[in-house]
C-alpha cells in the first residue's frame, strides 16, 4: 500500500482487515499456549478447568511442575549455556567478518562471501548430518593414528556449539554489515590522518558505532541457538538442549508442563527482543 497515492475506502478497509487477520494468525497460537499454561487440567488442550500454578510449582505424583522437574531445568540450563557460547563466538567472528568484507581491497571477496552465506542456504538437517559425519571421522582418525580421544569430536555439548556457530556467525555478519554500511568512512580517515593506528581506529571509532548492532546480533544469535532443533538433534550428547528434551517428551506423553515451558520461552524472547529494539531505537 503506497500512502502517497489515493485509495478507496473499500481498499483501505480490506487492507486493515488483512493486517489484523494476519497478526491474529501469528499471535493466537502463542496466546493459547500461554493461557493453557495456567489451566487446572491434566491435559495439554482445552477445555478450561480453572486457574492454577501447578504446572510451574507442583511436586506430586500426578503433577510435576516446571520448577520441580530437575531434568527439564537441566535441559534449560544446557540451552542457556549453549546459546551463550554460540552467541559469544558468533559475535566475535561475525563482527570480524563484517569488517573484513567491507574492505575494498579484499581478494576473493565475492567467493568467500558466498561461502559465508552457505550455512543459511543448506538445510539444518543436512548441516547437522555433515558436521556429525565429519567430526566422527576426524575423531576416529585421531584415535587410530595418535591414540587421542578428543571429546568435542563426539556428540557432545561442544559439538553442538560448533554446529550452531556455523550458521550463527553468518547472522551476526549480516546484521553488523547492515549497520556498517551506514558508517561514515571519513571519520576513520580523519583519525588515521591524526596518526592513530588501525587498531585504535577500530576500537575507538568503528566499534562504538557498531555497538547497538553487535548487542542486537548477540541477542539474535542467542535466540537462534536456544530454539534450534534440526541441527542440534544430530550433535547432542547425553545432556539434551531444551528443544530436544521437549521433542523426546512429547513423542511419548504430553502434559501442560510443556505449556508452562512455552510460556517462559515466549516471555524470555519477548524481553530479549524488547531490549534489542529499545537499544537500537535509543541509538537511532
Image: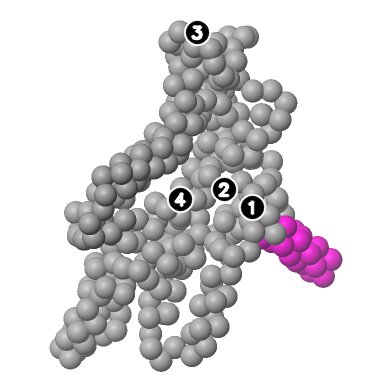
Res 193 → quadrant: bottom left
Determine which residue is flagged by label 4: 222
Whole-angstrom CA distance, mark 3 to mark 1, is: 38 Å
Decide if residue 243 is on the left or right side of residue 102: right
* Circle 2 SS class: loop
Asked if the residue under mark 4 is in contact with the one under mark 3, i.e. CB atoms within 8 Å, the reply is no
Whole-angstrom CA distance, mark 2 to mark 4, is: 10 Å
Determine which residue is flagged by label 3: 49
Whole-angstrom CA distance, mark 3 to mark 4, is: 36 Å
Applied colour scheme: one colour
If you read the primary sequence from the N terminus, does the residue marked by circle 3 or circle 2 appear first? 3
* Circle 3 SS class: loop
Whole-angstrom CA distance, mark 3 to mark 2, is: 33 Å
Reply above or below: 44 against 146.
above
Whole-angstrom CA distance, mark 1 to mark 4, is: 15 Å
- The quadrant of the picture occupied by the N terminus is bottom left
Determine which residue is flagged by label 1: 231
Determine which residue is flagged by label 2: 228
Find out whether residue 187 is within the magenta segment: no
Residue 23: image location, x then y, percent: 40, 39
If you read the primary sequence from the N terminus, does the residue marked by circle 2 or circle 4 appear first? 4
If you read the primary sequence from the N terminus, does the residue marked by circle 1 or circle 4 appear first? 4
Residue at 45% in and 17% down = 38
* Circle 1 SS class: loop
Decide if residue 122 is on the left or right side of residue 98: right
- The answer to whether any part of residue 94 appears in the image is yes
The secondary structure that dominates the magenta segment is helix
Amino acid at each position: 500500500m503506497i500512502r502517497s497515492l489515493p485509495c478507496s475506502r473499500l481498499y483501505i478497509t480490506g487492507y486493515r482487515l488483512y493486517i489484523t487477520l494476519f497478526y491474529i494468525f501469528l499471535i493466537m497460537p502463542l496466546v493459547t499456549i500461554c493461557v493453557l499454561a495456567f489451566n487446572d487440567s491434566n491435559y495439554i488442550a482445552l477445555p478450561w478447568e480453572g486457574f492454577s500454578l501447578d504446572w510451574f510449582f507442583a511436586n506430586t505424583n500426578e503433577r510435576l511442575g516446571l520448577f520441580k522437574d530437575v531434568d527439564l531445568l537441566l535441559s534449560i540450563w544446557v540451552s542457556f549455556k549453549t546459546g551463550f557460547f554460540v552467541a559469544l563466538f558468533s559475535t566475535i567472528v561475525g563482527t570480524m567478518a563484517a569488517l573484513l568484507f567491507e574492505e575494498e581491497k579484499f581478494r576473493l571477496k565475492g567467493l568467500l562471501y558466498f561461502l559465508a552465506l552457505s550455512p543459511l542456504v543448506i538445510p539444518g538437517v543436512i548441516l547437522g548430518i555433515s558436521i556429525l559425519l565429519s567430526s566422527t571421522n576426524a575423531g576416529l582418525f585421531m584415535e587410530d593414528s595418535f591414540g587421542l580421544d578428543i571429546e568435542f569430536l563426539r556428540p557432545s555439548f561442544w559439538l553442538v556449539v560448533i554446529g550452531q556457530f556455523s550458521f550463527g556467525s553468518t547472522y551476526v555478519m549480516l546484521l553488523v554489515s547492515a549497520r556498517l554500511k551506514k558508517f561514515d568512512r571519513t571519520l576513520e580517515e580523519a583519525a588515521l590522518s591524526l596518526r592513530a593506528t588501525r587498531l585504535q581506529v577500530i576500537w575507538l571509532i568503528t566499534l562504538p558505532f557498531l555497538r547497538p548492532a553487535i548487542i542486537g546480533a548477540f541477542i539474535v544469535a542467542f535466540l537462534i541457538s536456544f530454539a534450534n532443533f534440526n541441527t542440534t538433534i544430530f550433535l547432542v550428547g547425553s545432556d539434551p538442549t531444551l528443544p530436544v528434551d521437549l521433542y523426546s517428551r512429547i513423542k511419548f506423553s504430553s502434559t501442560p508442563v510443556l505449556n508452562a515451558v512455552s510460556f517462559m520461552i515466549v516471555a524470555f524472547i519477548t524481553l530479549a527482543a524488547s531490549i534489542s529494539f529499545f537499544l537500537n531505537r535509543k541509538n537511532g
